[in-house]
Image (spheres, rainbow, N blue to C red):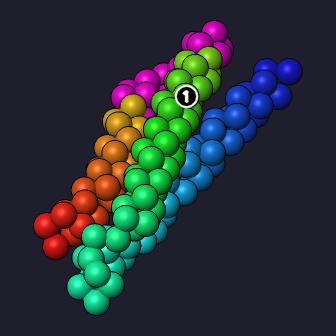
Amino acid sequence: MLSDLHSHVVGEIQQSSRTDTIFVVSAVLFNLVVLGINWGVASEANNPNRGGGGGGSDWILAVLFVATVLINVFSIRALIAGQGTRTKLINGLIRMYEDNNIAKYYDPTLLDSYGARYKLFVAVLASLAVIAIVVPLLERFLG
């Protein structure tokens, strides 16, 4: 029974890691694609051959900026939830290990390492979101 519980908890941790990976990769790809699209739209809006200042382009930029903020907020919230899930599952494993006198084989400082990793993931997503918004704005209004 204990072995089954252990396998279940480890499986849940693995599933949580896969889900976190999907959110991070999806958000990073989204930010990079939106950066390219927004930059192109902003550049085209400043194109003198089109008359410049394209109002439709500004609406496209605004919609994609809102989408960028929403996608990143959702992804960051999912990562924070994933971090909480991982922490609870690992704490359960540690208690199980303590109850069975094998806790000495698991280094609890790994929780700090996982926490730092999640903070870095959030920082990367937030940085890319800011870049995906600021760079096209600079191109649009200063380009």
Residue 120 position, x and y percent, is: 33, 43
Residue 136 visible? The answer is: yes
Residue 90 position, x and y percent, is: 57, 25
**Is residue 47 found left or right of 82 in the rendered image?**
left
Image position of 32 with respect to 67: above or below: below
- Which quadrant does the C terminus fall into? bottom left
44 and 7: which is toward the camera: 44
Is residue 10 magenta-colored?
Answer: no
Q: Residue at coordinates 55% horizontally, 48% vertically from top-left?
A: 23
The residue type indicated by label 1 comes to: Ala
Q: Which residues are magenta?
A: 95-114
Image position of 81 with respect to 65: above or below: above
Image position of 51 with respect to 71: above or below: below
Q: Residue at coordinates 63% horizontally, 10% vertically from top-left?
A: 99
**Is residue 89 found left or right of 140 in the rendered image?**
right
- For label 1, the residue is 81
The quadrant holding residue 93 is top right
Magenta residues, dominant SS class: helix
